[in-house]
Image (cartoon, rainbow, N blue to C red):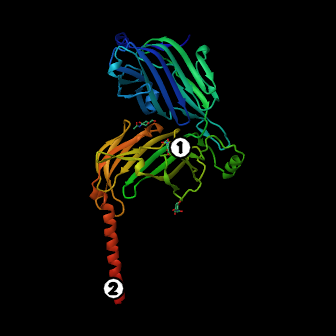
Amino acid sequence: MKLILKFLAACSLLATAAATVNDRITKSTEIAQSTAVSTTTYQLSSIDDSMYAILVSPEEYAHLSHSSVSVKGGETLPSTWIDDATLFGFKKLLVQLPPSSFSSSLTLTHSLALNTINDPLPREITQDDLAYSLSYKTYTHVVSPYHTHDMRVKIRTPTPKILKYGMTYDDSKTTKNGGVITYGPWIDTAPYSIPTDHIEILYEAAGPRLAYEKVDRSAQVSHWGNTISYRDDIILRNIGPSLKGQFTRLTHQAQSFLNMLPTNVATLLEMRLPNQSQEVWFVDQIGNVTTSHLKQSDAGTVLQLKPRYPLMGGWKYSFSVGWENTMKSVAKVVNGLIKLSVPFSNTPSDVAVHEAVTRIILPEGAHMLDVSVPFEGATISYETTYTYLDTIGRPTVVVTAFNTSAAHNKDIVVVYSLSILNAARKPLTVSAAAFALFMTTSLLRRINTKI
Ligand SMILES: *[C@@H]1O[C@H](CO)[C@@H](O)[C@H](O)[C@H]1NC(C)=O
Ligand SMILES: *[C@@H]1O[C@H](CO)[C@@H](O)[C@H](O)[C@H]1NC(C)=O
Ligand SMILES: *[C@@H]1O[C@H](CO)[C@@H](O)[C@H](O)[C@H]1NC(C)=O
C-alpha cells in the first residue's frame, strides 16, 4: 500500500502516555451544495483520562459553522478548542468525559456543520450550461492521538454522478455505491498518523448553491395581542458559478417550459417556519410577492418562496418574510416568571449564512433576568426598542453570530418578569391616547362650532 503517513515527532511522547484506545472510528460526511454535515463516532475503551482529544483538519476548522460532542444518543459534553503548533495545522478539541467513563468504554458522537467547504467548478458558466460540479478535498483517514483498531471514512454526495474520487493506488480500500464512497477499513492506525495527501471528490451539483449574506430577525412579544411576531430581513445570494455573458429572459422561459432549467438557477427557496405559523407575509423591494406558497402539516409550516426573478449565479435577492405564533407556543410561566423560547433562526438545510442577527423584543415594562444561547461563538448585547405609543421602551436582547447554518436553528431562552401594572401599561397608554384624541376632537368641534 502506497499510503504514506506522517508521524509527528513531538507526539510520540503523548502517545505512549495515552492508554485510551479507539476500538472503532466511523466518520460520515454528507456534502450538499453550500453546506456539509459530518458525524464521527468514536468507540473508546481503556479510558485512562478525564479528557478526550479530537483532531479536526485545518480545512474543516476554517469552514466550521457548528461543532458539538455528545455521548452517543445522550448528553452533550463540554469541549474546548486548543491551539497546538505541533499538529500540522490540525485543531485539537478537548472533550470533558463523564466521570463514570473512567477505565471503561464509551461511544462519542462528534457533529460538525461546515459551510462552503467545497468549490464550484467551473467558476463561471453561461446560461446554456445545464450542470456544474463541486470539488471537495478531504482526507481518507481520521487523525487521532490514540491508537485506532478500525477506521472508516464515508462521504455521501447529493447525486451519484461522481466524476472523480481518490485512492487509485489501493482500489480494494475504496468502494463507491451510488452517491456513497467508503475509504477503509483501516486496521491498527498509529496515533497522529496524518495522510500526506488530500483526496478530491468531484461531483455534479444537485441544485443551486445558496447563501444568506445576512439575515436580520426581530421577534416581538405582545402579551396584549397574545402573539409573537417575527420579521426576517434576508439578503440571499447565489454563490454557485457566476453567470458568464448576458442574461436573456427568453432563454430562461424556454428552459422553464422545456423543464430543462440549469442546476444553478434558484427559482424556489423552502423555509421551515415554526409549527402553526399564522399571518405569513413575503415582501421584497417592489412589494408583496404573491407567488409564494404555504404548506401546513404536522411536520411544521413550510413556506415556499419564489423570488421575483430567477436567481442566476452571482446574483443577489433581498426580501423580508414575517409570521406570527401564539404566545402559548413559545412562553411558559415558571414561578411567576415568563420563560420564552425563540428560535435563533430557521435557516434551510443547504444554505450557508455569513451573518445572522436575532433581536428578541420584550413587552414594555418587562424586566429581563436571563438569556441563554444554545451554541457557542455568539455575541449578546442589549438595547431598548421604541415602537408607536411606547412610553418607556421595550427591553431587547440582540444575539449575533457568524458562519451559521441549519445547525443553529435552536431556541434562545429568555427569562423575564412582568408585573400586572406593566402588563396593563399598553392598554392604559392606548386609552390615554384615545382619551387625548377624544378631547382634541371635541375641542376642535367646539372651536368649529364657534366659527
Ligand atoms: C400585501 O399583502 C397584505 C396581506 O396579504 C395586504 O394587507 C397589503 O395591503 C399588501 N400590500 C401591498 C402593497 O399590496
Ligand atoms: C406540530 O403540531 C402537531 C400538532 O398540532 C404535532 O403533532 C407535531 O409534532 C408538531 N410538529 C413539530 C415539528 O413540532
Ligand atoms: C467565517 O468563515 C470565513 C471562511 O469561510 C472565515 O474567513 C471567517 O473568519 C469566519 N468568521 C468568523 C467570525 O468566524
C-alpha distance separating marks 1 and 2: 60 Å
Label 1 sits on a secondary structure element that is loop
Numbered mark located on residue 298 in the image: 1
Label 2 sits on a secondary structure element that is helix
Which amino acid, by three-letter code, is at mark 1? Asp
* Residue topped by disc 2: 447
Q: Quarter holding the N terminus?
A: top right
Which amino acid, by three-letter code, is at mark 2? Ile
Q: Earlier along the polypeptide chain: callout 1 or callout 2?
A: 1
| Badge 1 residue CB within 8 Å of ligand 2 | yes
In the foreground, 250 or 149: 149
* Quadrant in the picture for residue 355: top left
Tell me which image quadrant ligand 3 sits in.
top left
In the foreground, 87 or 291: 291
Q: Position of residue 215 (x, y in %)?
A: 45, 47
Up-down relation of residue 223 to residue 130 (above or below): below
Residue at point 40%, 51% (across, down):
327
Residue 193: tell me if it is visible.
no
| Badge 2 residue CB within 8 Å of ligand 1 | no
